Structures are given as structure tokens and as C-alpha cells.
Image (spheres, helix red, strand yellow):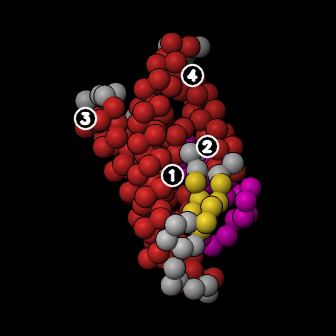
Amino acid sequence: MNKNTVKICICAVLSALYVGLDLLAVSLSAPFGGTLKLSVSGLPVIIAAILFGPLWAGAVGFVGAFIGQMLSYGFTATTILWVCPATFRGIVMGLLFLLFNKSLKPYILVIETIVSSLLVTAINTFVMYVDAKIYHYPVALFGISLVNRIIAGVITAVIFAIIVPLIIKLIKRAIKV
């Protein structure tokens, strides 16, 4: 099988995994008020970034988030906006991985995953604001929920950085990429 076919197949599986993990996300009451969505759906995007680079990872994020949006909400005026965070996570994570010479050292992965996670939080906050303006719901809780989302993003980023090297090693052993 040719290398592009293998990449397409792996990225399709990672996109599907994104959808499944996103559907399994848990919403909890947050310590500073509001609710907090805990999700590990970014993990397949990070794996794609490390295996194949920013464009492929952006594609995994886009396809996974788009399918997830369609399954959960259907097509709305803001669907494309809600796809942007996952897409940009893949692109930024892939670029950072290249910038740091493709290092799988945990402290470098922590930096990369935290930066990409903070970017996702910033874009999500913007999308939430736009969504609130379009659909006329209150935006007063964004400040409170932003603190919760930043904390959750940093924690999940550190967890991702710890488990990603093992996952990458297993994937590379199973499939020559």
C-alpha cells in the first residue's frame, strides 16, 4: 500500500476517534461557577500532528469536529466557527512539533500541548461569544467559565504530553509511517 493511502486511512481513523471521544465528553459543575466540558477529543489531532505534520493534523481536526457538530447540532450559522478550534489545534501543534525538531521529550510536549490548548481555549471563547450574539443568549459567564476552561485545558495538555510518546511509539511499531 502506498504511503499516502496509509496516511489517509490513519487520519480517517483519527478523525473518527475524535468524534467518538468528543461524544464521550463529560460536563461537570466547575469550581468557579458554571459548567466545564472535559474532553480528550484533542488527542487524535495531536497524534496526527506528530505523525504527519500540521496540514494532516488540521484536516483531522476539521473533519472530526465537523462530523461531531453535524451529529450533535446539525448545520447552523456557526458550524464552521465551531470547527476552527480543532483545526487550528492540529496546525499549531504540528508547527510547534516541527519548530522543536520533532522532539518527544515530555517537557517539550508539555509546552507544545499547553500552547495549542490555550489557543483552542481562546478560539472557543471567541466562537462562544459570536454564537451568543447570533443566537441571543447571555455572555456574562464567559469570564468565569474562561478560568475553568484554561485550568482544564492546561491539565489535559499535561496529560496528553505524558501519554502521547507511548501512543506514538505503539502506532509506529504497528504501522511503518
Residue depicted at x 47% and y 31%: 163
Residue in the foreground of this view, choosing between 102 and 144? 144
Q: Where does label 1 land, which residue?
A: 86
At mark 3, the secondary structure is loop
Q: Quadrant of the N terminus?
A: top right
Mark 2 touches mark 4? (CB < 8 Å):
no
In the displayed structure, 79 sits above or below 97; it is below
Mark 3 touches mark 2? (CB < 8 Å):
no
- Residues in magenta, as a range: 58-80
Q: Which mark is residue 3?
A: none
Which marked residue is nearer to the observer: mark 3 or mark 4?
A: 3
Q: Where does label 3 land, which residue?
A: 100
Disc 3 to disc 2, how far (Cα)?
25 Å
Q: Where does label 4 land, which residue?
A: 6
Q: Measuring from the top left, give residue 172's x and y in whole percent.
A: 49, 17
User: Would you identify the image quadrant in which residue 15 lies?
Assistant: top right
Q: Residues within 10 Å of mark 1 (few under 14, many from 20)?
A: many
Q: Residues within 10 Å of mark 3 (few under 14, many from 20)?
A: few
Q: Earlier in the sequence, mark 2 or mark 4?
A: 4
Q: Which mark is residue 18?
A: 2
Total number of numbered discs in the rendering: 4
In the displayed structure, 60 sits above or below 27; it is above
- Decide whether residue 161 is among the magenta residues: no
